Image (cartoon, helix red, strand yellow):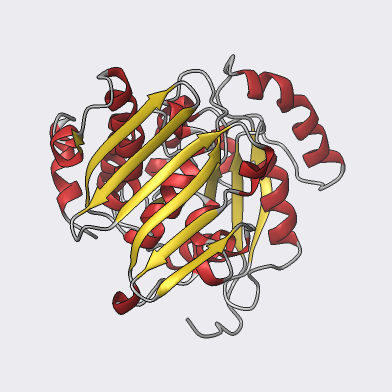
Amino acid sequence: AGLIRNARMIRIGLIGLDSTHALEFTRAFSAGISDARSPVRVVAACAGLGTDFPLSVNRRDRIRRELVQALKIPLTSSVLELTGMVDAFMILSCDGRCHRREVFEVISTRKPIFIDKPLSADWRDAIAILQAARLAGSPCFSASALRYRTGPVGLRIPPADRPVHLEIVVPRRQEPGHPDLLWHGIHGIESAFGLLGAGCLSVQRDFSAGNDATTGSWRDGSTACIRRVDDESARSFPIRIRSATGEWSYDDFDYAGLLQIMADFFHSGTPPLSDREMVEPLGFAAAADASRDQGGALINLPDFLAQGPIECEPLSRSR
């Protein structure tokens, strides 16, 4: 997109004060990271749902204090108060189990909503979120920053040089109430889907002593292996890409790509991903757990997703 001159500033309301993204995203937008094309600012914030999620309990007081004292963001006493002050929402609560209820509190506003990864801790809830948002007329978007890595991997590879195989390493860490791969693993999954797109056919997980690797196969024969390890090097989510013309590796990322996409979305009201592109990675994670529980069985992902609610039907179509 070209420059948008004299574009109006979009006011963002932040919901959820227990994720470090609340601080990082607010700082980046305040610094004007997206101003050349789509200026946005966080202007107010509200606590999300109360939860006993360990990360939330351990971080919420510090993050709230820094948001107010250092970044000068006012807090509202309720979501209702917040809705009258803003043009769009960021739901950043770190517990994905809260997202459905938090989204449902604001979808009647018909304002754009960004939901931090994971869209939900349950792929069936993710479908319900997207269906409800569509019916209410509130545009909804969710993604990991690693889907939009800046640098070589952040660029969509031309069809003639489509990856044949991806190897992605992620930290082993997981959190209560979420499938194994929906915490740090979601970054690896979204890296794969960012490069290969929707259309994963099968998921198979090798879960044994000293090894935890999940392989997805796509319609055209491309594959992606996501490996969970305890090694410190996994914190950079390194990825190795093999295509018809060669191989290369990449082990760096930042938030710039995602934040620009988010700002553009807040201005346009058009989600950059289809419902299927947002739900399929969550189904991938759940299918990986199903494969683990069945001793490494091959899980047909379309069949797995077809077990969901009837609202899953529109996922076969893009926006």
Count numbered badges in the picture. 0
Percent x, y of residue 266: 50, 61
Q: Is residue 78 above or below residue 23?
A: above
Residue extending furthest toward the right: 69
Q: In this view, does 116 lie above or below 79?
A: below
Residue 161 seen: yes
Q: Which residue is drawn at 41% across and 36% down?
A: 213
Rendering quarter of residue 158: bottom left
| Quarter of the picture holding the C terminus | bottom left
Percent x, y of residue 23: 73, 45
Q: Is residue 229 above or below residue 42?
A: above
170 to the left or right of 107: right
Rendering quarter of residue 156: bottom left
300 to the left or right of 12: left
Of residue 112 and residue 130, the one placed in the foreground of this image is 130
Rendering quarter of residue 271: bottom left
Q: Residue at x 57, y 48 (%)?
A: 237
Q: Residue at x 17, y 55 (%)?
A: 317
23 to the left or right of 311: right
Percent x, y of residue 76: 67, 35
Residue extending furthest toward the top: 52
Q: Residue at x 47, y 56 (%)?
A: 147
Of residue 45 and residue 59, the one placed in the foreground of this image is 59
Of residue 34 and residue 236, the one placed in the foreground of this image is 236
Of residue 45 and residue 130, the one placed in the foreground of this image is 130
Residue 272 seen: no
